[in-house]
Image (cartoon, rainbow, N blue to C red):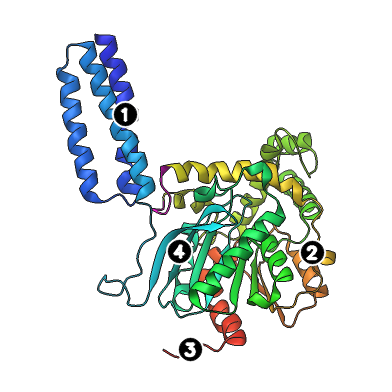
């Protein structure tokens, strides 16, 4: 009985975790939290008083049931916070929803946020592949909601849309097809002929492909952390990581990089090989440009209430699984030749310290790119993510340059 009770207490501690974390990173109502707490206190009382094995096991079953309900509740109550005025009241005509949409027969998730549903729609394409940035955009780019209806899409394989499509079936063509259908849904819903498109990292690859195929659907394209040629970029990044590691005297990391060899990597262990030199690049960028929304903050944002517990697990799974299977399919990408001409205004926002998407490749692509209008805009205190590292400047550029030049800013 003593051993059974010790075992039971150990299990109970584990089962208490899903309930204990509900107030921190979910939108489960307080009334339900109180009910869970009362039930668990009662179960604890029964457990400590029980002298029979059968009752102890039944009590454990009760804790299991509460933990399952907590996980289920975190999923069904997941939401995006309302947009409130100074009196904590929802702003009239605003929109703040987390919705499931059907794209080419599969269920995927989006957030829609804006202070005025009649404003232009801006579709955000997250980095990755397999990445989700529902919380980051809400947190760092909330001022865009003053001028746009901002739509953030969890792409297939990412967080809330992790199970939308079997990951081995993901192709660039499928991403483009789903994105195109989402654009058409948004055009119809908000009665707008054209949208604005903002891509970040992997999202810039999808973004360029999308505006190249459907230029008549977009006012303008904005790229942050613009990718140009994945293989050339990775080789340059690896060489940079070798040099910086050697200069710092970090022999252990240097040995790991040398043992892994130069990318591109494929097969077993490829993800960790990429992580080995990405970590060096991220360390370099953080040392030179420790902006607001740097990589160090990103893990904390998975606690956002947009994600239930299953979504939070899939947030990590998506980054690993999709990258491992899909990223090698981009080895032949080279926008310098494959997208040398675009028929929409193009704005590249480039972090001066970006060594993840090499700034020199973006400059080269920009110089040869033909477009109705193009701008290369430098962010002096940013690395790979200027939209998060210098969000005020980024929003100012989107509103006062992009929006002002492509669509007259409506007076309040």
The local secondary structure at tag 4 comes to: helix
The quarter of the picture where the N terminus appears is top left
Measured in 3D between alpha carbons, the distance from the residue under mark 1 to the one under mark 3, in whole angstroms, is 55 Å
Q: Is residue 240 magenta?
A: no
Q: Is residue 403 visible?
A: yes
- Name the front one of labels 1 and 4: 1
Residue 338 coordinates in the image, percent (x, y): 82, 64
Measure the C-alpha gap from mark 4 to mark 2.
Answer: 30 Å
Q: CA distance from mark 3 to mark 2?
A: 35 Å
Q: Is residue 108 above or below residue 371?
A: above
Can you say which quadrant of the picture contains the C terminus? bottom left
Distance of mark 1 from mark 4, alpha carbons? 34 Å
| Residue matched to label 4 | 138
Q: Nearer the viewer, mark 1 or mark 2?
A: 1
Instruction: In the rendered structure, find residue 410 and report the number of the disc placed on it.
Output: 3
Q: Depth check: 316 or 123 in front? A: 123
x and y percentages locating residue 161 in the rendered image: 53, 50
Determine whether, in the image, residue 86 is placed left or right of residue 356. left
132 lies left or right of 114: right
Q: Give the left or right position of residue 23, taking residue 327 as reference.
A: left
- Residue for point 57% across, 45% down: 318
Q: Are marks 4 and 2 in contact (CB under 8 Å)?
A: no
Which image quadrant is residue 342 in?
Answer: bottom right
Distance CA(mark 1)–CA(mark 2): 52 Å
- Dot 3 or dot 4: first in sequence order is 4
Tag 3, which secondary structure?
A: loop
Mark with earlier residue (4, 2): 4
Q: Check disc 1 and report the residue beneath it.
A: 64
Magenta segment boundaries in residue numbering: 304-309
């Amino acid at each position: 009985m003593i051993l059974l009770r010790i075992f039971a207490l150990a299990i109970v501690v584990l089962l208490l975790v899903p309930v204990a974390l509900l107030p921190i990173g979910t939108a489960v109502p307080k009334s339900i939290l109180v009910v869970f707490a009362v039930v668990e206190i009662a179960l604890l009382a029964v457990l400590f008083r029980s002298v029979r094995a059968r009752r102890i096991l039944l009590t454990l079953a009760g804790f299991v049931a509460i933990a399952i309900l907590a996980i289920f509740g975190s999923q069904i109550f997941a939401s995006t916070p309302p947009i409130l005025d100074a009196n904590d009241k929802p702003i009239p005509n605003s929109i703040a929803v987390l919705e499931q949409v059907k794209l080419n027969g599969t269920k995927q998730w989006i957030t829609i946020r804006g202070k005025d549903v009649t404003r232009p729609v801006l579709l955000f394409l997250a980095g990755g592949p397999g990445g989700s940035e529902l919380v980051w955009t809400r947190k760092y780019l909330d001022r865009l909601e003053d001028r746009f209806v901002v739509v953030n899409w969890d792409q297939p394989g990412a967080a809330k849309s992790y199970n939308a499509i079997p990951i081995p079936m993901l192709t660039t063509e499928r991403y483009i097809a789903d994105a195109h259908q989402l654009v058409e849904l948004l055009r119809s819903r908000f009665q707008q002929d054209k949208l604005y498109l903002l891509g970040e990292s992997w999202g810039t690859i999808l973004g360029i492909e999308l505006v190249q195929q459907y230029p008549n659907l977009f006012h303008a394209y904005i790229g942050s952390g613009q990718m140009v040629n994945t293989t050339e970029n990775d080789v340059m990044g690896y060489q940079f990581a070798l040099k910086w590691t050697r200069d710092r005297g970090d022999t252990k990391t240097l040995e790991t990089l040398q043992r892994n060899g130069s990318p591109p990597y494929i097969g077993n262990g490829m993800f960790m090989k990429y992580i080995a030199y990405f970590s060096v690049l991220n360390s370099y960028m953080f040392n030179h440009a420790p902006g607001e929304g740097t990589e160090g903050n990103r893990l904390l944002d998975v606690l956002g209430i947009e994600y239930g517990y299953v979504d939070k697990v899939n947030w990590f799974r998506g980054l690993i699984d999709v990258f491992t299977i899909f990223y090698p399919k981009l080895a032949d990408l080279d926008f310098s030749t494959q997208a040398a001409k675009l028929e929409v205004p193009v704005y590249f926002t480039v972090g001066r310290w970006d060594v993840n998407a090499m700034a020199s490749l973006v400059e080269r692509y920009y110089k040869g790119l033909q477009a109705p209008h193009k701008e290369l805009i430098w962010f002096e205190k940013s690395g790979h993510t200027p939209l998060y590292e210098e969000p005020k400047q980024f929003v100012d550029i989107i509103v006062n340059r992009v929006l002002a030049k492509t669509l007259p800013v409506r007076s309040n």
